[in-house]
Every structure is written in C-alpha cells, then in structure tokens.
Amino acid sequence: MTPSDARSGGPSATVDLQCSGSIATIRLDRPEALNAFDRRLGEDLLAALRRVAADDAIRAVVLTGAGRAFSSGFDLTTVRNGDFVAPDGRPDLYRILVERFHPSIACIRQMPKPVVAAVRGPAVGIGVSLALCCDLVVASENAYFLLAFINLGLVPDGGASLFVPSRVGMTRATRMAMFGEPVPAHQAAEWGLIDDAYADDEFDARLDALLERLGAGPTRAYAGIKRQLNYWLSARMREHLELEASIQQELTATSDFREGISAFVEKRGASFTGS
C-alpha cells in the first residue's frame, strides 16, 4: 500500500483509512451516530484492520473516531430492527459479538505492529473494549470511558471483562462494571486504565509525536513484545470472549434486558425487577 487516503469500502463506507508514510489512521466514521457499531461499521473496521496488518510498509496504527466521540458502543436500533435475531425470536447478541466484534479484537491483538487508540469524547460499551484491546491508549481531557452494559441489564463484552481488570485490577473493574459510571480521562490515566490524558489543545501534537516514535522504532521488536505480553492474555482470550458472548445471550431472555432496551429507546430511567 502506498501512502494514500482511502475509504475502507466504497462511498458508503463507515471507516476512513488514511496512510501516510509508515503510519495508518483508521477512523470510525459514523459521526451522526457517535460512531455506534452497526453491521457495516463492524465489517468495514475488520477490513481496514486486516489491510494494515498485512502491509509491511505500515509500522504503527492509530484507531480513532470521527466527530464528537470515539464510539458510543453498539447501535441499539439494530436490536429493534432485527439485524440479528435468534431462532427463538430474541436478539442474537451471541452472533453479533462472534461475527461483528471478536474478529476485530483478535486482529488488533495479533497484529505484529503497535496499535494506538486515540480517544476523544465518549468511549462507551464495546467502544471501551475496542480502545482497551489496543496496545496503547491516549485520550483527550474531554474523553471518558463508560461500561454502560449494566444500564441495559447486560454484562461487559468484547473482552471488556478481561481487558479492564488486566489494566486496573478487580476492585476498579467491578465498580466500573456494576455501577456503570463514566470514568473521566484524567482519572482513567491515574488508574492505569489508559496510558495518558492530553490537554485538548495539545492532543494532536502529542499523538503525532507518539506515532512518529513508534513508526521509527524497531517494528520486529514491537511485534515480539506483543507476543510476550499476549502470551498470558491471549492464551485465554478466545475462551473468555466465548464466555462473555454466552452470558450476554442468556441475559436477552430476562425481563431486565427488555426493560433496559425500552428505557433506553424511550429515554427514561429503567425499572429493573431482577428477573
């Protein structure tokens, strides 16, 4: 691939892939939906990731979002419109995770080059998972990280229940998952959830400096470091992702999930019954 600007999948693509020298920028590009994941965004992201992973001229990758958000998570309108429906009529969250998200998570972890998540604005739900599966995570001071699953009567998925405690420990991971409260960027950096939080007016310059350093570094050594760090994590990642998806699918049968989805769509507080 020569340095270029290219849409990932034609004129209606939801991912913008730009390559400049040894750096590739993958930008989630559904700003009108705060980069919420639908089927097309999942497909376009995986295509872009595979493209840069296979290009030896690319030595570092940055993953970011267009507009005001990194990603607001899974597009819940696809639950209502039957994007994936199980044989029993329930939303097939298991299939959504396995087909739409898990391949991208695995591609980022296995890519033999460093991947940086550059987070502006909210990273919510699967957006948190996507950011934290990257090798380095930097955020602007207006960013925040929110495991919002509990507000829908669901559990963290996309690897969040693996990546979050791996970074911040069980106590903080439990609080994030069970309370569903936003963690501002500076607090996330203090906790070790992310690598650094940059002032908004410094964000672009500091990100460019980080990418320049990675792009000029020993790529094969970076790949070896990823293999080492992945050894204990990725050895169980596939099994862990399967567990998350299975539990998530179980919860689609609960009254609390139905109430959580209704409350979200109707923009009101949920009234959970524990059933």
Image (cartoon, rainbow, N blue to C red):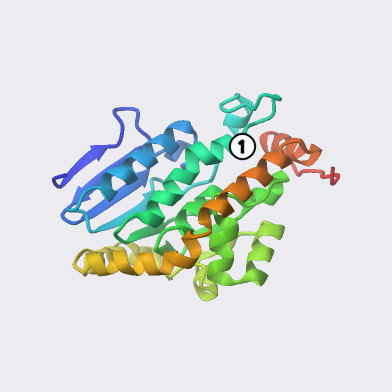
User: On the picture, is 158 further left or further right than 208?
Assistant: right
Q: Is residue 208 left or right of residue 102?
A: left
Please give the name of the residue rendered at 47% of the width and 32% of the height, measured from the top-left corner. 39
Q: Which residue is mark 1?
A: 93
Q: Residues within 10 Å of mark 1 (few under 14, many from 20)?
A: many
Q: Quadrant of the C terminus?
A: top right
Residue 80, by quadrant, is top right
Q: From this viewpoint, is residue 174 visible?
A: yes
Rendered location of residue 210, percent (x, y): 29, 67
Check the image and report above or below for 125 versus 268.
below
* Picture mark count: 1
Which residue is at 57% across, 35% downward? 95
| Of the pair 66 and 17, the residue shown nearer to us | 17
- Residue 90 image offset from top left, x and y in percent: 69, 29
Above or below — where is 134 with respect to 3? below
Q: Mark 1 falls on what kind of element?
A: helix
Residue 154 located left or right of residue 237:
right
Residue 142 is at least partly visible in this image: no
User: 175 or 204: which is nearer to us?
Assistant: 175
For residue 199, which quarter of the picture? bottom left
